[in-house]
């Protein structure tokens, strides 16, 4: 009598995408962060349309007024509406972050790929360059670069972008070195594919998850540093309503008019927080190896 | 072993040299004519010219570079264009303040990080761990200057416990050191936690418990000692963080250290002073990292095994 | 003969992401004074789980003890308080692990680690403990005990590290049970023999009363053990004296295991293996866990889990073929 045995069934197949999707949804904090970032983007795009007052309009009668119906967040030391300034300032914040990250991603990835793939003396030169960039403690490089380029928001963005390059380069380089030894890359080389094709088709796609995780964190850092530079007077120059510059004003007047400090500081922190949380959430999903954090 | 040391030393000197050259070139690009900045554009041409001659900016770049290197090797960094004082002297006045701030804040950061990092690790995934991790994440999101201003508002203004700014005695050190210390403790706490978790996963932790050692001894003696190794390396990075953070903290609290000097000299286009500050910051940072690397080499027996 | 250790119907499971994994499904083991019980089974059969459960080193949140008792010298270890269990460890029961390198603290010297154990279990001060540690190393046939005591784990060979581990395990004069979890599996064959001789010698000179020896290698069983228990997927399927296991084993799994051992002499064309796959312990087969792979299975095998039946003196089998 033939006995049917069904002990060798395998579990139902769940695709990787489905599992990741479940994780994203379970991660409520990531969702909230996305919502906050979405709000920032909306503020940047539509803010100026909804701003109740002209952020540059000086009105000495209404100096340092607490929040009221006419001025939702109150006014600063020159009578300008803080709420409108925050809305306008969101554009600069978003712009600064985007440009800094773009510069970092573009140049950093390029250098990293080059260093990891070609190795040899090219790699050594690139690594020396990266070591130099990293040899300056974190804010100092940015401060000096901004000074060289002339204090302005534009210089700040470029300086921060340059600062992020070594981080991308290092990560991409180590990823490239690992991937280079993978069998599918060896196979492609032997099949006669040229180097650029291999880089673009095999190595780069495998680096994308690292780039994404690094980018969210770089974005957060960029917002932070833009604000810091604005505060120091080296970044956004008055009368630009950049949030960091607004906190500089706030510092002077916090004792008599805390709203000048509170609102820009709150928005700076909120957005950095959102990007950091998002970065953590994405890292949980995309890079299981780093889940220990 | 000393061959390795020699190699590293050579590499350090090479990097320093490159750095110095790079700093020289980069700073020469700072826009703005120093003479005009100091005396105003309406001054007479001859006066401006003579000032420029005094500063040496009328010479072609490569001659300036040669003079610069010559002077550097002699230990002379020139004179501040603003204050006419020796750059070395200016730096010398500022360095003790920055060192004081850095060291105290690193101590504060270490205490906070070790305390919370260990609690977080041994109670992994419980309520206390999650709260600590949440605070760490939030801590990453608060820029130093906002933290500083907030602390001033709270403790100097509202409570009046500490002076609002300036240096003078222990009382004025507490707020800036707390600010910088809190700022640095964030990444350090995370590191302590990860390092401890890493060690707790190892097989020898079970073997140690199997010996009959109490949990207390296993964690605070064996596990912590092993976890300390990567933390010590990170101290080099922490020092860099403290230098960078000091730039902002000193500005917020008007603390007369190197950070404030740097910002001030940039704003006044005082090239020799900027140069001196940047050189000091970067060379100091490189040296400290080099020393930490050495310490790490001696502290971790496994690294010695790998290098063999 | 006194019972040193008696495991009664131990059921242990792990809470995993995929479900509840039944690691131990009613384990029954007895170790009497003077026994060296060999526990043999494949990887994943639960051998190490048994060892760690006796020591109380299984972390309880993912793991759960669903039933059973572990009676050591009359006391149920599962009902002991944490402090009492800690006192027993290393003192009356000790364990040596498979990978000696990953069982030693990498930043402390060997001598210090042994001395730490000695100081814990004997009433001596720091210096005496150090002396005794070196003495112990000499007793285990280490040529230069002082040099070894000053070394760090990574500086020693695998065999030396395992000897150091044995020295740590033997640091208590009250030792009644030594658990050896595949102590020679990661060592090469020549070193294996010397370690096994060492363990045999420990029993002979009464340093330890009894031993639970976990392995997957029948040759080791033949060298060292007095009794054998075969474990499959968290179930004990057969226990018998050492002499019977090779000549008179009854359970189909034991027979298949023995057949799978490659022969040195004779013409063997192919390696024999057991057909089928190791069962999924989250959804184990109904009835006897081995029945999907058993060539002699009957209808009842997929309905009921077989109970242990006495075949002979000291020889028990859990199989429906012998009902």
Image (cartoon, grey):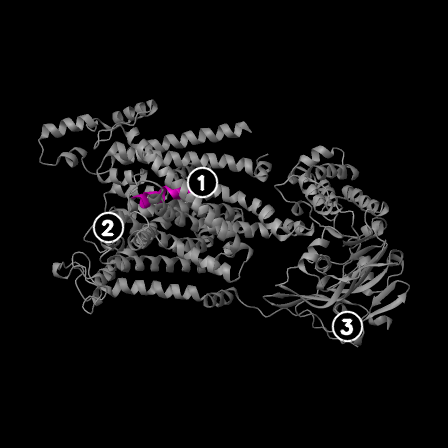
The subunit letter for the residue under badge 1 reads B
Crowding near pointer 1: few (<14 within 10 Å), some, many (20+)?
many
- Using the image as rendered, state which of residue A40 and residue A98 is in the foreground: A40
Mark 1 vs mark 2: same chain?
no
In the rendered image of this protein, does residue A111 appear above or below residue A63?
above
Name the residue: 27% across, 33% down: B273
Pointer 3: what residue?
Answer: C305
Q: Quadrant of residue A97?
A: bottom left
The subunit letter for the residue under badge 2 reads A
Q: Quadrant of residue B142?
A: bottom left
Mark 1 to mark 3 CA distance (whole Å): 62 Å
- What's the mark number on residue B236? 1
**Residue B245 colored in magenta in the image:** yes
Q: In the image, C225: left or right of A37?
A: right
Q: Give the range drawn in magenta.
A: B238-250
Secondary structure beneath label 3: loop
Q: In which quarter of the image is residue C287?
A: bottom right
Which of the two marks, 2 or 3, is nearer to us in this view?
2
Mark 1 to mark 2 CA distance (whole Å): 32 Å
Q: Where is residue A36 in the image (x, y as percent from the top left)?
A: 35, 64
Instruction: Report whether residue C181 is seen.
Output: no
Q: Position of residue B308 (x, y in %)?
A: 59, 34
Secondary structure beneath label 1: helix
- Using the image as rendered, state which of residue C124 and residue C210 is in the foreground: C124
- Using the image as rendered, state which of residue C143 and residue C121 is in the foreground: C121
**Residue B241 colored in magenta in the image:** yes
Q: Where is residue C230 in the image (x, y as percent from the top left)?
A: 80, 60
Crowding near pointer 2: few (<14 within 10 Å), some, many (20+)?
many
Crowding near pointer 3: few (<14 within 10 Å), some, many (20+)?
some
Secondary structure beneath label 2: loop
Pointer 2: what residue?
Answer: A236
Secondary structure mostly seen in magenta is: helix
């Amino acid at each position: 009598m033939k006995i049917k045995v069904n002990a060798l069934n395998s579990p139902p197949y769940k695709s990787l995408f489905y599992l990741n999707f479940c994780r994203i949804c379970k991660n409520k904090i990531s969702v909230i962060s996305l919502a906050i970032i979405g709000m920032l983007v909306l503020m940047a795009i539509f803010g100026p349309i909804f701003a109740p007052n002209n952020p540059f309009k000086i009105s000495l009668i209404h100096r340092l007024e607490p929040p009221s119906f006419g001025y939702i967040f109150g006014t600063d030391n020159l009578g300008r509406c803080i709420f409108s300034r925050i809305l306008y300032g969101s554009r600069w914040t978003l712009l600064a972050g985007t440009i800094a990250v773009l510069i970092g991603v573009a140049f950093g990835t390029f250098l990293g790929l080059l260093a990891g793939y070609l190795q040899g003396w090219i790699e050594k030169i690139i690594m020396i360059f990266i070591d130099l960039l990293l040899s300056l403690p974190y804010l100092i490089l940015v401060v000096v670069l901004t000074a060289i380029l002339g204090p302005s928001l534009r210089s700040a963005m470029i300086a921060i972008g340059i600062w992020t390059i070594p981080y991308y380069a290092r990560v991409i380089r180590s990823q490239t070195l690992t991937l280079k030894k993978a069998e599918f890359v060896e196979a492609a080389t032997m099949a006669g594919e040229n180097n650029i094709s291999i880089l673009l088709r095999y190595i780069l796609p495998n680096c994308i998850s690292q780039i994404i995780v690094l980018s969210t964190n770089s974005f957060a850092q960029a917002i932070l540093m833009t604000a810091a530079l604005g505060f120091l007077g080296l970044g956004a120059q008055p009368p630009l309503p950049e949030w960091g510059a607004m906190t500089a004003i706030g510092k002077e007047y916090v004792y008599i008019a805390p709203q000048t400090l509170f609102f820009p500081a709150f928005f700076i922190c909120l957005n950095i927080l959102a990007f950091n949380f998002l970065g953590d959430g994405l890292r949980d999903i995309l890079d299981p190896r780093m889940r220990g954090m | 072993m000393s061959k390795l040391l020699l190699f590293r030393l050579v590499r350090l000197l090479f990097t320093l040299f490159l750095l110095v050259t790079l700093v020289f070139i980069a700073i020469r690009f700072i826009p703005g004519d120093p003479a005009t900045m100091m005396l105003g554009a309406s001054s007479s041409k001859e006066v401006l010219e003579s000032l420029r001659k005094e500063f040496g900016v009328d010479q072609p770049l490569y001659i300036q570079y040669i003079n610069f290197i010559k002077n550097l090797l002699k230990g002379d960094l020139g004179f501040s264009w603003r204050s006419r004082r020796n750059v070395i002297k200016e730096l010398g006045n500022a360095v003790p303040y920055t060192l004081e701030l850095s060291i105290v804040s690193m101590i504060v950061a270490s205490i906070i990080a070790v305390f919370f990092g260990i609690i977080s690790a041994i109670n992994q995934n419980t309520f206390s761990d999650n709260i600590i991790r949440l605070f760490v994440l939030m801590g990453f999101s608060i820029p130093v200057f906002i933290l500083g201003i907030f602390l001033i508002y709270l403790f100097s203004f509202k409570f009046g416990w500490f002076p609002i700014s300036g240096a003078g005695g222990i009382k004025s050190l507490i707020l800036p050191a707390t600010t910088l210390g809190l700022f640095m403790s964030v990444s350090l706490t995370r590191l302590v936690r990860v390092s401890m978790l890493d060690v707790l996963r190892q097989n020898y932790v079970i073997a140690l418990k199997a010996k009959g050692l109490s949990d207390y001894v296993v964690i605070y003696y064996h596990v912590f000692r092993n976890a300390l190794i990567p933390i010590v390396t990170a101290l080099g990075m922490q020092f860099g963080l403290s230098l960078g953070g000091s730039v902002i903290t000193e500005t917020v609290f008007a603390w007369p250290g190197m950070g404030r000097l740097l910002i001030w000299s940039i704003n006044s286009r005082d090239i020799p002073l900027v140069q001196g500050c940047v050189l000091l910051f970067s060379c100091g940072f490189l040296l400290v990292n080099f020393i930490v690397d050495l310490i790490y080499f001696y502290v971790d027996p496994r690294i010695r095994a790998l290098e063999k | 003969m006194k019972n040193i250790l008696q495991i009664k119907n131990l059921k242990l499971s792990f809470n995993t992401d995929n479900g509840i994994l039944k690691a131990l499904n009613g384990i029954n083991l007895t170790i009497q004074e003077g026994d060296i019980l060999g526990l043999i089974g494949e990887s994943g059969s639960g051998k190490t789980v048994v060892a760690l459960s006796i020591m109380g080193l299984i972390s309880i949140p993912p793991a759960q003890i669903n039933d059973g008792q572990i009676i050591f010298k009359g006391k149920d270890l599962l009902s002991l308080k944490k402090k009492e269990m800690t006192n027993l460890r290393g003192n009356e029961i000790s364990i040596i692990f498979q990978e000696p390198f990953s069982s030693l603290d990498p930043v402390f010297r060997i001598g210090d680690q042994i001395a730490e154990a000695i100081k814990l279990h004997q009433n001596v001060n720091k210096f005496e403990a150090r002396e005794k540690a070196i003495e112990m190393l000499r007793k285990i046939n280490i040529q230069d005990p002082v040099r070894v005591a000053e070394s760090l784990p990574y500086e020693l060979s695998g065999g030396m590290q395992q000897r150091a581990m044995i020295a740590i395990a033997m640091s208590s004069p009250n030792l009644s049970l030594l658990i050896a979890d595949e102590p020679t599996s990661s060592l090469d064959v020549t070193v294996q023999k010397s370690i096994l001789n060492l363990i045999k010698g420990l029993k002979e000179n009464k340093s330890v009363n009894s031993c639970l020896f976990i392995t997957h290698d029948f040759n080791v069983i033949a060298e060292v053990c007095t009794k054998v228990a075969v474990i499959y997927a968290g179930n004990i399927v057969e226990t018998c004296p050492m002499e019977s296991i090779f000549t008179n084993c009854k359970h189909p799994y034991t027979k298949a295991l023995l057949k799978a051992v490659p022969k040195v002499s004779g013409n063997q064309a192919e390696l024999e293996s057991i057909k089928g796959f190791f069962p999924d312990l989250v959804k184990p087969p109904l009835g006897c866990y081995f029945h999907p792979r058993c060539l002699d299975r009957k209808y009842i095998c997929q309905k009921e889990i077989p109970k242990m039946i006495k075949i002979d003196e000291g020889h028990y089998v859990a199989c429906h073929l012998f009902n």
